Amino acid sequence: MRPTFSFANNYTKITTLDMHTGGEPLRIILEGFPAFENKSVLEIRNELREKYDYLRKAIMWEPRGHADMYGLLKVPPQRPDSDFGVIFMHNAGYSTMCGHGTIAIAKAAVELNWVKSTPPLTTIRIDAPCGQLTAFVKHNDQGIESISFENVPSFFVDTFAIELPAIGLVEYDLAYGGAFYAYLNIDQLGLICQPENYGEIIRLGRLIKKQIMDSNEKITHPFEQDLSFLYGTIFIDQANEASNHSRNVCVFADGEVDRCATGSGVSGRAAIHYAKKELAAKQTINIESIIGTTLAVSVQREVEYGAFNAVIPLVSGNAYFTGYQEFWIDPNDPLKDGFFIR
């Protein structure tokens, strides 16, 4: 029996469903945020940023979250054929695309009956800040077997170089997979993508992102100015397991490290490899994360996207439930808005 807490009557209460995809957390907000009607996903995101950002900080940051927490707010659909919309959030603000979040919310939508389940395959259309995503939930006799999603058009921009202090000139590929990333082979830095290098990976990821943002004018989305920024740095290494293609470690937001292989990140990887003729259409590759979990990605088809020859990637994985929580915000708590220490 759930106890009654009369002292909490004047608290702000936020309920969440917690999940993870490949080890990367996702906190889905169920109640406690404002309701939004008749607005686009980008309009909702801007309103959250301008008026309600204290709520994001309260559940992403300590003491309720941590520096690597990730969140999602389900909102009304923007398009007539979409099932719902999503706003992605993290330690520094709001992101344009999130693959692990898309996989998790698709599973939650089926398990919680937010959409009509149609085994053996349920199709869900989701409005995200980067555009409409199409997710596919595959069922078997034991339940949900896997989740895939078709990402927005993803494209390779070009290869560039920057000078890093004490390291020298390093090359990176700039690509878009729902967000812009700089992709570097980590052997240029004398490191490997392993947990013991976590701190140095964060330091270099933040440094590289800042230098590129200060110097590269090519980070321009074909249609949305709100998407024209560098979201993160992705380091590439050899896979630990011979059956996998490679290893991917993404540093994004304010030094946040993705525990999974990064759905938008592997979408950009697919665009790069396809443009360089290193990946054939419909060929699937498995990419490891820093902890060894994997996401699969393939190129489904080519599309024209503004001035770019883009591709539609298909990303596959699975997500798991970890809990249901009700968070309280005491108006008299001096730390009510949260904090984080990197």
Image (cartoon, helix red, strand yellow):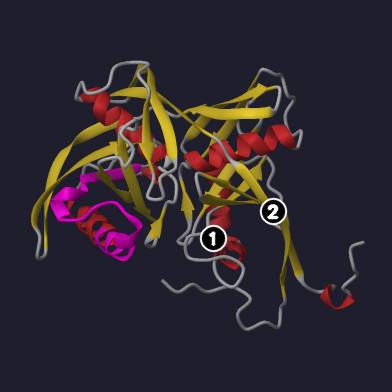
Per the image, the residue denoted by label 2 is 323
Residue at screen point 59% across, 73% down: 63
Q: Is residue 112 left or right of residue 277?
A: right
Quadrant of residue 243 within the rendered picture: top left
Q: Name above or below for residue 42 compared with residue 194.
A: above
Q: Is residue 322 left or right of residue 160?
A: right
Q: Name above or below for residue 244 compared with residue 68.
A: above
User: Residue 173 lies in magenta, yes or no?
Assistant: no
Of the 4 image quadrants, the one containing the N terminus is bottom right
Is 310 in front, or is 219?
310
The residue mark sitting in front, 2 or 1, is 2
Quadrant of residue 196 within the rendered picture: bottom left
- Kind of residue sitting beneath label 1: Glu
Label 1 secondary element: helix
Of the 4 image quadrants, the one containing the C terminus is bottom left
Numbered label attached to residue 50: 1
Residue at screen point 69% across, 56% down: 33
Residue contact between numbered discs 2 and 1, judged by CB atoms under 8 Å: no
Q: Magenta region: which residues? A: 180-204
User: Residue 181 lies in magenta, yes or no?
Assistant: yes
Residue 139: image location, x then y, percent:
66, 23
